[in-house]
Image (cartoon, grey):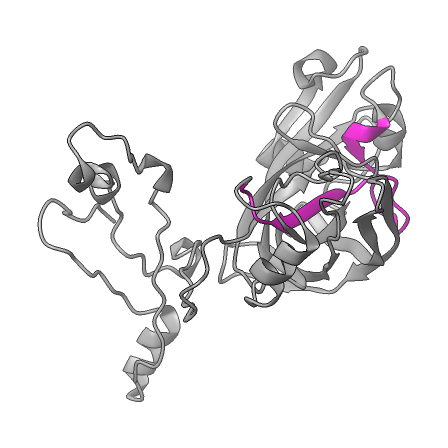
Amino acid sequence: MGFLDNSGDIILDAVLTDIGRKRMAEGNFRIVKYSPGDDEIDYSLYNANHPSGSAYYDLEILQSPVMEAATKQASSIKYGLLSITRTDILFMPTLKANQKISEALNKKGSVFILAANRETYENLSSDSVLGEKFVLEPNTKTPSRTVVIESGIDSSERQATLENRNAMLVTTGLLDSNFEFKFDSRFVAGLTSVQSGKFANLSDGTRDISMTTFAARTSIGAEDFIENYSTAIAPGIANLVAKRDNDATGFDLSGFEGPRGTVTAATFAPSTEINAAGSSTPSFYSLYGRTSVAAATLGFTGSNTYDVIDTTVYVRGLTSGTQIQIPLRIVRKKS
């Protein structure tokens, strides 16, 4: 593995997947698909105010170090490019974690916290230790808090009206009706997500949100993504929080200033390897996390100590392909 020399001519670096190499060895190899990606590119480096003129606006992007194409499937493209034939699309949807509504889990620092078991949840949900809005309840189909994911246009250049939602997301085919969750199956045993509900505001701007029906989702292995990961599909519901006639923007309920698309809400079940209660620490915390961490170190109050494992959940809109990473900290109270 190394970097491509991008100082001169344009280079196209292509490799075969594991399946491609297998078929070549079997003598029935034929290229039928290819997938470009731009994992290493930071488009925020585009500088329209460069003092040397327009020829230099994208210079830093073009000079970004780009890795050679990887043959190992789990190390290959994470952010694939889309082919869109329409020429009138000016904005692409993105995903955000909503922390504005009362049903949404809030981050503690930079992470979302999942209690490893009931004892830990009862401890952390106390306002004297952390608070209910900062911790996910494990193994429940009636969660009081969930990780709420919204799709929408992250721009104030277009108002968040229902007309713009239809024009920019629905008719363009960029509305994500389903979301793919990928999680490390060593630590997360499964996914439960909202099945139906309402996510809107009324004409006077007040909330009209109800997400009370949840269902467990079937998960399958996703070893081609990252080793030990599993994937599950969660449906989305229409995000009809919009700018209303009384100039209520809905920004108090949504993380997007522009048109909103869909929303999903999910919670996770800790795996049996890490959910045991008691003073004896399960081995996975020693192998993959930290043990006997003081409450103050984690931003909690009190004198208890905790075992923790940090992991990442990847969420992707199945229509638009847009992705978000959810930093998840699994916490277990030591009795």
Which residue is more in the foreground, 266 or 17? 266
Residue 189 appears in the figure: yes
Which residue is more in the foreground, 107 or 320? 320
Q: Quadrant of the C terminus?
A: top right
Q: Is residue 30 magenta?
A: no
Residue 221 appears in the figure: no
**Left or right: 80 in relation to 52:** right
Q: Is residue 150 magenta?
A: yes
Looking at the picture, how far across and down is residue 11, in whole percent?
A: 16, 57
* Residues shaded magenta: 132-155
Outermost residue toward the front?
A: 245
Outermost residue toward the left?
A: 8
Q: Is residue 186 above or below residue 25?
A: above
> In the image, what residue occupies the spot 77% across and 29% down?
134
Looking at the picture, how far across and down is residue 269, in whole percent?
A: 77, 48
> In the image, what residue occupies the spot 30% across and 84% down?
29
> In the image, what residue occupies the spot 27% across and 65% down?
15
Outermost residue toward the bottom?
A: 28
**Left or right: 47 in relation to 156:** left
Looking at the picture, how far across and down is residue 240, in whole percent?
A: 75, 53
> In the image, what residue occupies the spot 87% across and 15% down?
128
Q: Is residue 196 above or below residue 249?
A: below
Looking at the picture, how far across and down is residue 311, in whole percent?
A: 60, 39
Which residue is more in the foreground, 112 or 204? 204
Residue 279 quadrant: top right
**Left or right: 8 in relation to 235:** left
Q: How many marks?
A: 0
